[in-house]
Image (cartoon, grey):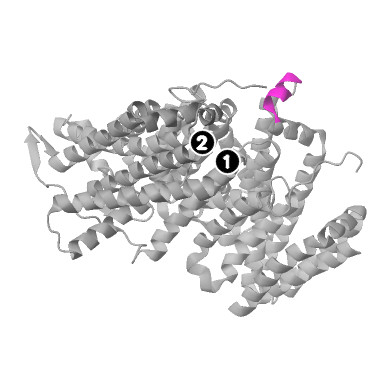
Amino acid sequence: MTGFIGIAAIAAFSYFFLHAESQPAVLGLIAAAVVGVPLLGRFGWIERASRSLEANKLGGRIAIAIALAAIVWLFREENFAMLMLASVLFYTVACLGLTVQFGYAGVVNFAGAAFLGVGGYTSAMLAPHLPHVLVLVVGGLLAALVGSILILPILRTRGHYAALITVAFGILFRQFVEVNDALGGPQGLQVKGLDLFGWDLNSPIGELSFYTNYVLVGLALAALAFMLVRRLERSWVGLNLDAVRLDETACAVFGIDVARWKILAFTFGNFFAGVAGAAYAMMTGFVAPNSFTFADSLIMVSIVLLGGVGNAWGVALAAAIMLVLPEKLQALQEYRFLLYAVLVIAILMVRPQGLIPRRARDYFA
Amino acid sequence: MGDLGGQRVWQGPAQAEALTRVVDVGLLGQYVANGLMLGVIYAMVAVGFTLFFGVLDVIQFSHGDVLTVGAFTGLATFIAVQAAGIASPWLQLLFVILAASAAMALLGALIAKYLVLPLRSAPPLNILLLTLMLGAALRECVRLFYPQGANPKPFPRLLPQDSLALGSFTLRVDNLMLLAGGVAAIVAVHLVITRTRLGLAIRAVAQDAETARIMGIHFDRVVLLTFALGSALAALAGVMNGLYYNEINFSIGLLLGVIGFSAAVVGGLGNIYGAILGGFLFAALQTIGAVLLPGIFPGLPSAYKDVFAFAVVIGFMAWRPTGLIAERTAERV
């Protein structure tokens, strides 16, 4: 029961937050969350809610689906809220990919935005020629393929040396698309809107915002990604990935093929980022080098870390915070990157395990 | 990142094409001089990265942005000194360098004390992300709080603007002085590390922090001093960068930081010679990318030089995963 109250409370909060227009209202809601959530945690309510949801998995899922449907329905005519929601969903998909990479297998990736970009540019080039479902898949596959260039250096290096490879790749990608005239140079390219089996998502249905269509697609993608990642985490594959992250040497000793699992996680994650990038580009209608900078990769890493490394729910929550908060704080619009930076630094100092730390595997569950 | 420091190296495919048509010794000389200049700046940044890694085993990724703040401190000092009525460019330069290095030494020590040392036991990824974010914060602070910080700022020409003509190659005196200054700074840091008691302490901490403590070395103090030293060097590099291009902007540190980091890693983290080597290597790669590539593959613009340089770095890491001069590590299982 507490679980359902919790879901309802989160849904209500999201509604009021997205709805809030005036700055005092936004600030008040933020203050309420900042003070209220730790208080609830202090009295054990959050723990109780999450336990009640675990006891009743099906009920919890239905409740979450109803809550999401309610929010989408309430904002169905508002462009801005729907755009925000869709962005959060696509970023969630991409960051779930990063979660598999360094949450599970421990492969750091500071080029998340580059893989989003591979997906985005794929959809820009292929959308006029191929069915769009295929474009999404090809976007993911190409991202995975491009990522495979990095596999050898990543397998050979460790720690900071491995971090350099993705950092360098992220910058290389950005420079490459900027100077490549076939890819539009600094201006970027136009992207056609998503068209699923003859359903043109850019033409609104009735009074609805056309972004609502993308929210629905985003929900489907995010649900799919979520399911896959959760299944992966609970499976023997996830167990192997965890082992690789925790102790490579011990893994090798016990006959676990470290290279194989790292490749799997890296490719899997890049595929997600590519699919998300392709869909996101179709929604925004253009791709440009400036959308795929190192700073954007950092935002993705921050989302994973802020949510709690390896926790799929945390990713969704953190994506919502990182993307919606700066948009809502109009007064602070100019200071948004500073705000991000300070927020992440504060989280790392005060709560390094993230907002919702990943739980230990439960053998008896 | 198109408008960043490293981007403005003798741009223009026209020049590169001219080179392929006639081997112009003068132009080649310009490229070499430019490459050396960049190399010295990169090496100075890389030495900082490698020093920090040596004592704490962390990457201080805001190092590049410390450089930016240093350059802007220098610019502000110049304006203040000029307002105070000091007209001699040498005195102005002295004040600019002193103020920038002192301020950045302090900033570096503060970063070490309040942000890096408290997180010493956290996973390396956390510190990397923390300092990356700190870099973003510093960059944003310059952009938002320096008067009109979002626009590029002209940096004063404080060095003599004469040039020497050597055949078809004109050597600018200020470039020569900058090069000499950079080399002198690196040599000075090297002497501090190898010849002084402080340097001995730094090397001891880098080798084995625990034992160094037992031998009576004040660990925290050595770390703070190391960060101060490296950051002062970055400030100097920032001022040099400003003097060289006569312009600075709030985002020069991002690319310079990444390049410095790459140089330090390619050289082998924790090794000063490696960092210097890496810095010059990266500059050489950029120059090759800008000059030779368009010659070999006609139609490939020299703008691909950074793509080329970073691609080589990635490939290099696959070949030598711990850099040119490998860290000596033994892992206890």
Apparent side of residue A310 relative to residue A184 in the rendered image (left or right): right
Please state which amino acid type lies under the numbered disc 2. Answer: Leu
The residue range painted magenta reads A247-254
Residue shown at 76%/31% (left/top)? A240
Chain of the residue where label 2 is placed in the rendered structure: B
Chain of the residue where label 1 is placed in the rendered structure: B
Location of residue B106 with respect to A339 vertically, above or below: above
The residue indicated by pointer 2 is: B56
Q: Are marks 2 and 1 in contact (CB under 8 Å)?
A: yes
Instruction: Give x and y (percent) for residue A200.
Output: 66, 62
Q: Main secondary structure of the magenta part?
A: helix
Residue shown at 84%/62% (left/top)? A45
Which mark, residue B120? Answer: 1
Q: Secondary structure at mark 1?
A: loop
| Same chain check for tags 2 and 1 | yes
Q: Earlier in the sequence, mark 2 or mark 1?
A: 2
